[in-house]
Image: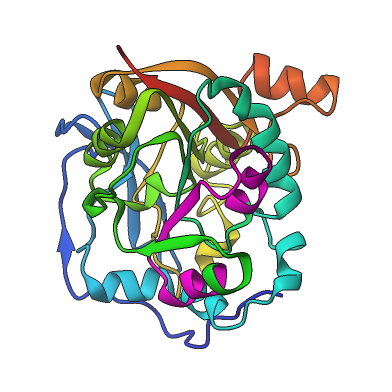
């Protein structure tokens, strides 16, 4: 099942805002590429930490949030249990493979928090090792209700940086969420407060310097392609990714917030731990040129 956005009218921000780099707060942007149905959005590259981010960007208000996540909210209106095995890029099988791999780094295995828990597929996979000590947090009330009713897993509704539970977690999982928030440093620091002494934080984000994105950018620079992704030609699309991370910028963000990286690699959604073939290992674990980036981290003791 795939939700359809009902309103195809162009999204016109009511207000724009100029921002410093979301990772290092530097103000040394260089134009990287333009995108959107009318090339109305700009990605710039930070001259300090190398992060690619939207600047100027639509003001991060309720108008923007409603427009950016229309398809996600509409999906929540129509989800069914049968979707757990088929949901695009977040299937139960995919997360089972990821959990089986990352759980070896969690020496305590006391409790799991999944930020942006969606349909609960990661948490359902994590039950194999953590039993009922799994919890989610999401912005969609209907998605949370679906998970609680059908999977019996507690989901808190709201923003993670304002979430203050009574317990701590030995594993916090943040998959393709960080690039959507305007204050990533606060989220990383808040995760540190919620981890047990030996707890780990697993972050999955897009890899802007993956070979596919790099190739598209070369086409853009050579004026052979007007924008980096055909999806942005849809006039109703909004830049829901406020920034596009890569290895260098993520290393900066984590070090700046006193996290150390235990392991990192790139991956595809069909092979979340990049171990199915020699080619996958070469491309994703040695060259680190895959579409997505996974980082297994922990606070510096």
Asked if residue 64 is positioned above or below residue 118 in the image, the reply reads: below
Magenta part mainly helix, strand or loop? helix
Q: Is residue 166 magenta?
A: no
Image quarter where the N terminus lies is bottom right
Stretch of the chain drawn in magenta = 122-147
**Taking 26 as reference, is 50 left or right?**
right
Query: Residue 53, image x and y in percent?
Result: 32, 43
Q: Using the image as rendered, state which of residue 149 and residue 187 is in the foreground.
A: 149
Q: Is residue 139 magenta?
A: yes
**Taking 83 as reference, is 229 left or right?**
left
Query: Residue 193, image x and y in percent?
Result: 25, 33
**Taking 273 as reference, is 194 left or right?**
left
Residue depicted at x 71% and y 22%:
283
Q: Residue furthest right?
A: 277
Query: Residue 30, image x and y in percent?
Result: 27, 35
Asked if residue 275 is positioned above or below residue 187 in the image, the reply reads: above
Query: Residue 291, image x and y in percent?
Result: 61, 37
The answer to whether residue 198 of the structure is visible from this angle is yes
Asked if residue 300 is positioned above or below residue 46 in the image, the reply reads: above
The image's colour scheme reads rainbow
Q: Using the image as rendered, state which of residue 1 and residue 27 is in the foreground.
A: 1
Q: Using the image as rendered, state which of residue 23 and residue 18 is in the foreground.
A: 23
Asked if residue 264 is positioned above or below residue 109 in the image, the reply reads: above
Residue depicted at x 72% and y 69%:
83
Residue depicted at x 40% and y 21%:
298
The answer to whether residue 33 of the structure is visible from this angle is no
Q: How many marks?
A: 0
Image quarter where the C terminus lies is top left
Q: Using the image as rendered, state which of residue 219 and residue 151 is in the foreground.
A: 151
């Amino acid at each position: 099942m795939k939700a359809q956005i009902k309103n195809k009218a162009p999204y016109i921000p009511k207000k724009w805002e100029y921002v410093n780099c979301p990772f290092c707060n530097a103000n040394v942007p260089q134009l990287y590429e333009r995108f959107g149905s009318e090339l109305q959005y700009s990605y710039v590259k930070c001259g300090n930490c190398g992060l690619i981010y939207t600047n100027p960007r639509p003001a991060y208000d309720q108008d923007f949030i409603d427009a950016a996540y229309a398809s996600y909210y509409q999906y929540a209106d129509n989800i069914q249990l049968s979707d757990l095995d088929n949901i695009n890029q977040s299937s139960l099988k995919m997360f089972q493979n990821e959990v089986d791999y990352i759980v070896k780094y969690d020496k305590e295995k006391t409790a799991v928090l999944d930020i942006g828990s969606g349909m609960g597929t990661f948490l359902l996979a994590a039950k194999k090792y953590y039993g009922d000590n799994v919890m989610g947090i999401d912005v969609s009330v209907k998605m949370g209700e679906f998970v609680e009713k059908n999977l019996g897993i507690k989901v808190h509704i709201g923003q993670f940086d304002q979430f203050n539970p009574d317990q701590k977690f030995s594993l916090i999982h943040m998959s393709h969420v960080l690039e959507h928030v305007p204050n990533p440093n606060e989220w990383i620091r808040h995760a540190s407060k919620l981890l047990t002494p030996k707890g780990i934080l697993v972050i999955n984000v897009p890899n802007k310097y993956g070979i596919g994105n790099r190739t598209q950018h070369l086409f853009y620079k050579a004026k052979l392609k007007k924008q980096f992704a055909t999806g942005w030609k849809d006039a109703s699309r909004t830049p829901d990714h406020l920034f596009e991370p890569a290895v260098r910028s993520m290393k900066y963000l984590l070090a700046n917030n006193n996290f150390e990286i235990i392991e990192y690699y790139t991956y595809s959604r069909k092979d979340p731990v990049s171990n199915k073939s020699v080619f996958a290992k070469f491309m994703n674990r040695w060259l680190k040129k895959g579409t997505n980036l996974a980082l297994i981290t922990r606070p510096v003791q």
